[in-house]
Amino acid sequence: MTGDSSSLRVGSVLWRFGPMIYGPTVLFSLGEGAVIPLIPVIASKLGAGVAVAALVSSALVVGQLCGNLPAGWAVARIGERITMAIGGTAAILAGVGLIAAPNLVTLTIAVFVLGFCAAVFGLARHSFMTTRIPLAFRARALSLLGGSFRLGVFVGPFIAAGLLGVFGDEHSAIWFALVCLVGVVLLVLLGPDPEKDAAAALARTASETVPDEDTGEVITGPVRTASPPTGVFRTMWRNRSVLARLGAAAAVLSSVRSARQVALPLWGVSIGLDAQTIALVVGISGALDFALFYASGQVMDRFGRLWAALPAMLLMGAGFLALSFTHGSSQAAMWFALFAAVLGVGNGLSSGILMTLGADLAPQRDPAAFLGSWRTLTDGGAAAAPLLISALTAVFSLSVATGAIGVIGLLGALGFLRWIPRYVPHS
């Protein structure tokens, strides 16, 4: 089997997942990306101050944290397709709530439900890919899934800005999100049956491939155990060792990623840059991040998970730590742009790594409960980072907060170096 023919077969299978997974993911993230920047604006128009508007926005992350475990329970019992459809439908109702909210309480509930639905939809597609993608190109498939999400989040705010320029009303962006969400539900329910098409695509690939080495079992269809699915909390207890070790390192990676989104704009403001320059620097960092998403999957499939996770954590940890020493420099703006690019490259190299590790570690016959626990850990890390930055900045300074994130990132790199070879050895 030549490398070219192998790549063609991989591409063929991934292409068949477009209508089932990648298309709905892009649509969902486009809608979410268009709405998220406008939540504080809507809150302020309902009478919220800066602190209250931030609290309303944080309901999105709280919803994601609360949604993972129930999503794991739902997927294990009613399947991925129905769960994704339910998540998309509930997100539509949340979007209607954003438009019609008469007060801050209703708005906060709608934002919470949107975050909850994002967790439900995300876990369902993660579980689907875990049970149906061959190990030989699992990382590429999940990196492409991560890239699909990043594309939507990257493009969504620009679409929202264009709609605001044309209509002058933030509700226009929410209507756009509703159209995207309706498209998600229609694709999931009326598109090609993911159970049948995944089985056919993977069976065809398996029959065409002559294995030169052990690449893992190809799972060719919906896998369900004869016995009832294991409960979420029982699964957490059975897997407490790996969750407390490798799961903790994954939570650190998630927190460093989240810190990048918060710390870079704050750093630009603190050194006196104007909003346009900050947006340009952050945008370039995001573009570098997006450009590398598939390369991350290639590295993980060819050389092992550690070779993506470790460089990513070292780059981001060292980048934050080095940035913390440049605040008073006469070339602070130059260093800001340089390390923002470094952080973008590091984040791009980690694309798909959390989903891939979760898929590697999850029980193949009943992954949903484990993935719910895994994603709760990583979402918890993401939620903790802004709180840590805020607290350290208030007590000490932004430089101290940035340096602390760098140190935490380097500790996370040590965690990956210690635990990935033990729990996910490359073979």
Image: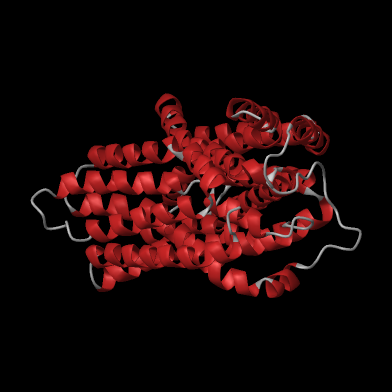
Q: Position of residue 364 (x, y in %)?
A: 75, 55
Left or right: residue 334 versus residue 248 is: left
Relative to residue 71, is residue 398 drawn left or right?
Answer: left
Q: How is the image coloured?
A: secondary structure
Say which quarter of the image contains residue 18: top right
Q: Looking at the image, is 274 positioned above or below residue 363? A: above
Q: Position of residue 44 (x, y in %)?
A: 41, 50
Specify the quadrant that holds the N terminus.
top right
Residue drawn at point x = 23 percent, y = 44 percent: 337
Q: Residue at x 16, y 56 (%)?
A: 326
Residue 292 seen in this snapshot: yes
Task: Residue 278: give x, y in percent of width and height.
Answer: 26, 42
Where's residue 89, x and y in %?
Answer: 71, 43
Q: Nearer the viewer, residue 102 or 189?
A: 189
Query: From this viewpoint, is residue 49 visible?
Result: no
Which residue is situated farthest in the right direction here? 226
Q: Nearer the viewer, residue 110 or 204?
A: 204
Count of labels in the image: 0
Outermost front residue = 212
Residue 133 versus residue 171: which sits nearer the camera? 133
| 321 left or right of 360 in image | left
Q: Write the residue at 38% across / 48% down.
A: 346
